[in-house]
Amino acid sequence: MPGAGSPRYAAAIVNHGSYDDLEACLASVAAQRVAPVAVLVVDTGVDPARLDALARAHPDVAFERRPNRGWGAGVNRLLARIAERHPDAEFALVLNPDIELDADFAALLLDALSADPRVAIASGKLLRPGRTVIDSAGIRLPRHRRPRDRGSNELDRGQYDRRELVFGVSGAAMLLRRAALADLAVSGEIVDEDFFAYQDDTDLCWRANRLGWRVLYEPRATGVHGRRWRRERRMQIEPWVRRHSFKNHYLQILKNERGADLVRNLPWLLAWEILRLGFALLRDREILAAYREAWRGAPRALAKRRAIEARRRELAARG
């Protein structure tokens, strides 16, 4: 149970076939110094027998099996269930199954968000297995507009040990302020389900910044992230998943980029696009179809852009 006076939160995990990882993730959630009011898992049904075994081993966890409609759809389902079943939970801790949290992870983030009501999203320092190399110390937005994990693949020498506001944080482990979700929702979705996989977390963070909310990095909150997608493993990822990542780059720009920033950053954007096209032609022709998929998704992205801009004006007028 949560400690006396501690903010209340629920933990939410989307699982797609990662049952060994999920077992370790659930153990780390159970070991949190400040316990969640509930732990909920949406599973895509890859191995029903494994899921049933986990459900027997973790009777306090609420498991639900649903068709695979992407990470965003799973997160949105979990957030809706938290709202229905645990409306007193002020925060939602969204996790990937390949995360193992240190025991103070939730407590440190809860303290940080409680101290700053401007913050809608927060995470901590994520390390690679072995704990010597950084996986993500928050996310930055370069001028070519492809978000990058800060410190990725760097030895952890304390260079990211300052708490600070950042552009974004990894969806592998992010704490969401539930009071902010009504502002962040577009067409009834917190996470954009058109993305299906990858960059939907940075899209959410970009939107939060556009709408006047803040994203916080708290380095004392640490955890280990296995991370399936790494640069050296890129070609091991299924082509259809790589295409989602490729096309989502364009969708989040269409939704979130300000016109003035687009003009100012145009040289970097164009240079990056030439490199992306060259890479696709020479190294990964299977992702070329992502250009067509991005074109098809552009009208919906632009409609969401208009909704975000209307929400921005509404929030600004509200003060």
Image (tube, rainbow, N blue to C red):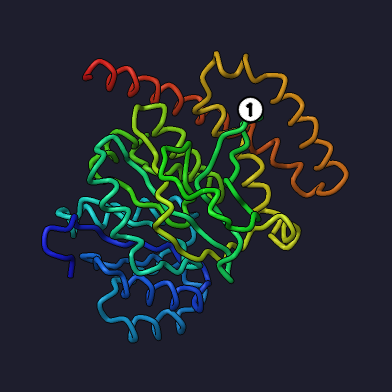
Query: Residue pushed farthest right?
Result: 282
**236 or 142: which is nearer to us?**
142
Secondary structure at numbered mark 1:
loop
**4 relative to 191, above or below:** below
Query: Which residue shows up at 48% across the image and 36% down it?
Result: 167
Residue type at mark 1: give it: Arg
Whether 179 is drawn above or below 110: the answer is above
- Tag count in the figure? 1
Classed neighbour count for the residue bearing mark 1: other residues with Cα under 10 Å, few (<14), some (14–19), many (≥20): some
Residue at x-position 62% and y-position 52%: 152
Image x and y of residue 85, in percent: 18, 59
Which residue is labeled 1 in the image? 143
Asked if 199 appears above or below 31 in the picture, the reply is above
Q: Residue at x 46, y 52 (%)?
A: 171
Say above or below: 290 vs 311: below
Q: Position of residue 48 (x, y in %)?
A: 45, 79
* Left or right relative to 5: residue 16: right
The quarter holding residue 238 reads: bottom right
Q: In the figure, residue 226 lies in which quadrant? A: bottom right
Where, quadrant-wise, is the C terminus in this rendering?
top left
- Residue found at x 50% / y 30%: 300
Q: Position of residue 173 (x, y in %)?
A: 43, 56
The N terminus lies in quadrant: bottom left
User: Residue 275 location in percent, x, y?
Assistant: 80, 35
* Relative depth, front residue between 265 and 158: 158
Q: From the viewer's perspective, is 214 left or right of 17?
A: left
